[in-house]
Amino acid sequence: MRCDCGASLVETTTCEQYKVESMVLVIANIPALKCPSCQAFFYEDEVLDRIDEIISTAGENINQKV
């Protein structure tokens, strides 16, 4: 697979932060494709779907008490 800049993409993992209501959710070890030339990251559709599920679940559980 190639980046828009023409370089070949490299499989890697990354970490992203998402704001969910009043908290910051950190998701680590996200599979990604990274361009070694322009440093752009790309995610496959299945990965984005899973991230959406995690964020949705976090939002649903944010007000639960232990």
Image (cartoon, rainbow, N blue to C red):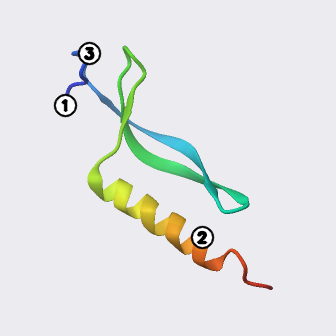
Quadrant hosting residue 59: bottom right
Residue 58 on image: x %, y %: 60, 70
Q: Which residue is mark 2?
A: 58
User: Residue pushed farthest front?
Assistant: 21
Q: Amino acid at mark 2?
A: Ala
User: Which secondary structure lies at badge 2?
Assistant: helix
User: Residue pushed farthest right?
Assistant: 66
**Label 1 – label 3 distance at C-alpha:** 12 Å
Residue 19 on image: x %, y %: 63, 54
Residue 32 on image: x %, y %: 38, 41
Left or right side of 44 for 27: right
Q: Amino acid at mark 1?
A: Met
Q: Nearer the viewer, residue 64 or 43?
A: 64
- Pick the quarter of the image with the C terminus: bottom right
- Number of the front mark, 1 or 2: 2
User: Which secondary structure lies at badge 1?
Assistant: loop
Sort mark 3 into few (<14), some (14-19) or many (20+) by Cα contacts within 10 Å. few
Q: Which residue is mark 1?
A: 1
**Label 1 – label 2 distance at C-alpha:** 32 Å
Sort mark 2 into few (<14), some (14-19) or many (20+) by Cα contacts within 10 Å. some
Label of residue 33 in the image: none
Q: Which residue is mark 3?
A: 5
Q: Earlier in the sequence, mark 2 or mark 3?
A: 3
The residue positioned 64% from the left and 78% from the top of the image is 61
Above/below status of 55 relative to 19 = below
- Number of the front mark, 1 or 3: 3
Q: Earlier in the sequence, mark 1 or mark 2?
A: 1
Left or right side of 5 for 39: right
